Amino acid sequence: MRAGEVYSMFDDELDLLRAKAERLIFQFNHEPDRQTRRRHLEELGIKMHPSAHIQQPFTTCYGCHITLGANSFINWDAVILDHGGVTIGDQVLIGPKVQIYTVNHALDAAARAAGEERAQPVVIGDRAWIGGGVIILPGVTIGEEAIVAAGAVVTRDVAPGDRVGGNPAKSLVRK
């Protein structure tokens, strides 16, 4: 899965990982104590710098494929499908209701019904700002200090320092 090869979403080992994630995410989302919430995320396998924060509620498939850098903040209602891995740099701000997808189902209907999927990583560079309601698709890299406007759908890489918006997201910087 992490190698970008086709795999089955019905794999027994993956099902066990998802069951663990479901339990720990439920506990995280219903826990009032911040330190206990952090322990749930660490048990899930999220690699978080001590200064990073994930706001409740939060949803992920596995969690163990997420890395979150120093002083980074993920706001309410984030959904991270982390099959292919999600690396979030330092000082990244992620707005509410952001969705990060690293997985695609097969395009062929029979293969899709059989559970075939392919995952690609998402990388968000240091000091990037991802506005509320943004959707980031598999395989996308967002460069350092880039800004993605609220509601954008990011289908391809964003250059460092660029400002993008829309569906699909396009540069807002005049050249």
Image (tube, rainbow, N blue to C red):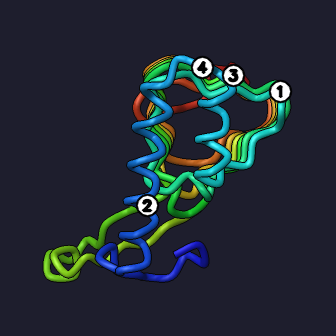
Label 4 Cα crowd, 10 Å radius (few <14 / some 14-19 / many 20+): few
Q: Amino acid at mark 4?
A: Asp
How far across and how far down the image is residue 52, in percent?
76, 29
Q: Amino acid at mark 1?
A: Ser
- Label located before the other in sequence (1 or 4): 4
- Residue 103's disc is 2
The mark lying in front, picked from 3 and 1, is 1
Relative height, residue 129 to residue 142 (above, below): above
Label 3 Cα crowd, 10 Å radius (few <14 / some 14-19 / many 20+): many
Q: Find disc 1 in the rendering and name its residue.
A: 51
Q: Amino acid at mark 2?
A: Val
Tag 2's secondary structure?
strand
Contact, CB < 8 Å: mark 2 with mark 3?
A: no
Q: Label 1, label 4: how many angstroms apart (C-alpha)?
A: 16 Å
Q: Find disc 4 in the rendering and name its residue.
A: 33
- Label located before the other in sequence (1 or 2): 1
- Label located before the other in sequence (2 or 3): 3
Q: Nearer the viewer, residue 20 or 121?
A: 20
* Image position of 67 (left or right of 102): right
Relative height, residue 152 to residue 3 (above, below): above
Find residue 3 and report its image quarter.
Answer: bottom right
- Label located before the other in sequence (3 or 4): 4
Q: Amino acid at mark 3?
A: Leu
Image quarter (top left, top right, bottom left or bottom right) of the C terminus? top right
Q: Label 3, label 4: how many angstroms apart (C-alpha)?
A: 22 Å
Contact, CB < 8 Å: mark 2 with mark 4?
A: no
Contact, CB < 8 Å: mark 1 with mark 2?
A: no
